[in-house]
């Protein structure tokens, strides 16, 4: 990755030549008026871009992927330094807080959950089970978008 705008806060601390992971089968062929390129690669002209005068960025590569060497730095720059998020959150504290909130809201109520087996409904089922235990009844829902034989 070549950083074109060394002053861009999204790329603060980045080194030129950092490896990034992206699909080279996809590309951005032009930017809208008011946007400018902030990073490129040897084959991708608009690997990253920014709206002039606004806190609005786009990146074509995947900063979250292991193969993007400084991807976590980019995400930190955006979430913490640009957006002002605090770094005091953890998955464990989320589960603890969510279960406490569910217990408080539901008390001894019985809960019926439509469960498709996808991530969203499965996470909801785990949290509800921790909160209400035997008061939870899950009903499997085949919504028609499951993979072949996934319902078995």
Image (cartoon, helix red, strand yellow):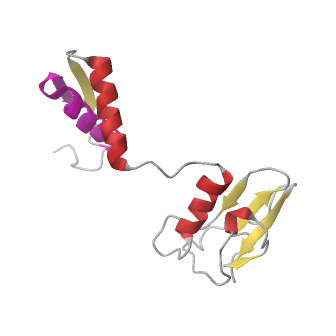
Is residue 131 magenta-colored?
yes
Report the side of 60 relative to 37 (left or right): left
Of residues 12 and 86, the one drawn nearer to the viewer in this rendering: 86
The residue sitting at 73% across, 72% down in the picture is 39
The residue sitting at 85% across, 52% down in the picture is 53
As displayed, is residue 147 above or below residue 19?
A: above
Is residue 22 magenta-colored?
no
Residue 22 appears in the figure: no
Q: Residue 78 appears in which quarter of the rendering?
A: bottom right
Q: Which residues are magenta?
A: 118-143
**Where is residue 109 shown, x and y percent of the image?**
22, 15
Report the side of 101 relative to 22 (left or right): left
Residue 88 appears in the figure: yes
Residue positioned most to the left? 134
As displayed, is residue 51 above or below residue 2?
A: above
The residue sitting at 69% across, 69% down in the picture is 12
**Where is residue 136 shown, x and y percent of the image?**
18, 25
Of residues 147 and 126, the one drawn nearer to the viewer in this rendering: 126
**Where is residue 116 shown, x and y percent of the image?**
28, 37
Magenta-colored segment: predominant secondary structure: helix
Of residues 103 and 44, the one drawn nearer to the viewer in this rendering: 103
């Amino acid at each position: 990755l070549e950083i074109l705008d060394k002053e861009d806060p999204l790329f603060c601390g980045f080194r030129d030549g950092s490896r990034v992971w992206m699909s080279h089968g996809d590309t951005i062929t032009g930017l809208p008026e008011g946007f400018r390129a902030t990073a490129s690669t040897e084959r991708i002209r608009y690997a990253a871009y920014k709206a002039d005068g606004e806190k609005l960025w786009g990146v074509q590569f995947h900063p979250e992927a292991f193969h993007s060497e400084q991807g976590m730095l980019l995400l930190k720059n955006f979430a913490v330094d640009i957006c002002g998020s605090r770094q005091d959150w953890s998955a464990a504290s989320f589960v603890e807080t969510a279960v406490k909130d569910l217990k408080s809201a539901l008390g001894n109520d019985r809960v019926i959950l439509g469960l498709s087996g996808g991530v969203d409904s499965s996470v909801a089922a785990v949290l509800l089970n921790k909160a209400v235990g035997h008061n939870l009844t899950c009903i499997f829902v085949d919504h028609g978008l499951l993979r072949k034989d996934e319902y078995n």
